[in-house]
Image (cartoon, rainbow, N blue to C red):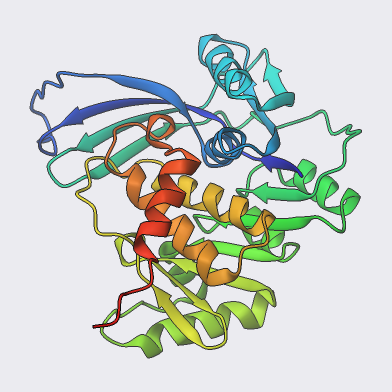
Amino acid sequence: MRAICIGQAAYDITLPIDHFPIENKKTRSMDKIECIGGSACNCAYLLAKWGIETYFAGVVGNDYYGDRIKEELDNIGVNTKYLEKEDNCRTTSSYIIVNTTIGSRTIITNRDKELVLENTSTNDKFDVILLDGYEKQFATKIIKENPKAIKIIDAGSLKEATVELAKMVDYIVCSKDFAEEYTKRKVNFNDLTSLIAIYTALQKDFKNKIIITLEDKGCFVYDNGYKLVPTLKMKAIDTTGAGDIFHGAFTYSIANKFDMIKTLKIANIAGALSVTKVGGQYSIPTLDEVMGKYDQCNKPRKST
C-alpha cells in the first residue's frame, strides 16, 4: 500500500495563553511550540506514523523552516522526493494563538503567492491519493496517472481549485464551512433536514461519497440512510490540526478497507484525542491509542 499526500506544508508557531488577547494590549505567553503543519503535510506525517508507505508532494522555501519540515517528514519515514525547495520564496508559516481555557485557536497564515510546485515528473504509482486543494496541476497529473487509486480530498475551505479537484475524487471530506459556503445553506443542529438538504445539494454536483465534518458534533454521512456519527467529548486544549488528523485517520481506514461507519468512528477518535495536546504535529495520536479507544467504545454491552 503506497499513499501520496499532495498540498500544503507549513511551519507552525503556537503561542498558548489562557484567554484571547485584547486588541492594542500586551499579552504574555509562557510557552512557544514550533512544529510542522499544513493539511496534506500533517496527513502524510500521520500515515507514515501509522505504518503506511507515504510520499509527500508540496513546496517549501529554501530556508530554515523548509529544512525543518523536510527533516521532520524524513524522520517519521515520509518519502520527500516530491517535496520541492524554492530559492525565491519563503516557506509558508502559520502563527497560532491558542486559548487553552476553551481550546479555540486563531491562525494567521503567511503564504507566498509564487509558492507553486513546478516539477511534475513522476515515476511512482500510488494506491491512495490525498489532496488538500493546493498544487492543482500536480494533483491532476497524479490522479490521471493512477486511475485505480483511492482518491480523497480534504475540502477545508471553498476555493476554485478545491471545487475542481473535488470532482475528480472518490471521497470528499468537507468541513461544515465548505458545505455551507458552497451550497449557500446553513446547518441547524436542531433540524436534521438542514444537513440532509446540504448533503443532497453537494452530492448532486459532485456525485461521489461525501462526508461533512462538524467539529465537536462529529460528522454526517449517507450510509444506508443519513447518519450523524458523534465524536468523543474531550476537554479541548488546542484544536489545531484536529481536522487534518481526522482526514489522515479517515485515509488510513479507507485504505485498509474498513466500512464507512468504522472509518468515521476511528477518524472521530483520532481528531478528538488530538485536541488534548498543543501543536498539530505533536497532537497526532499513535495507531495503538486510537484503536484501543475504538475497541473500548465499541465493546458489546453485557445483557442484564
Image quadrant for the C terminus?
Answer: bottom left
In this view, 266 is above or below 27: below
- In the image, residue 224 lies at what x, y percent? 57, 87
Front-most of 134 and 88?
Answer: 134
- In the image, residue 174 lies at what x, y percent? 52, 62
- In the image, residue 116 lies at what x, y percent? 69, 32
Examine the rendering and report whether any part of residue 243 can be seen.
no
The single residue placed furthest to the top in the displayed view is 64
In this view, 75 is above or below 10: above
Residue at point 21%, 45% (across, down)? 103
Count the labels in the image.
Answer: 0
Front-most of 48 and 170?
Answer: 48
Residue at point 42%, 23% (across, down)? 35
Residue at point 17%, 38% (across, down)? 100
Examine the rendering and report whether any part of residue 52 can be seen.
yes
Front-most of 176 and 283?
Answer: 283
The single residue placed furthest to the front in the displayed view is 304
Q: Answer left or right for 52 relative to 18.
A: right
Q: Answer left or right for 151 relative to 31.
A: right
Image quadrant for the N terminus?
Answer: top right
Quadrant in which residue 281 is drawn: top left
Residue at point 61%, 50% (across, down)? 252
Quadrant in which residue 61 is drawn: top right
- In the image, residue 120 lies at what x, y percent? 84, 34
Quadrant in which residue 83 is drawn: top right
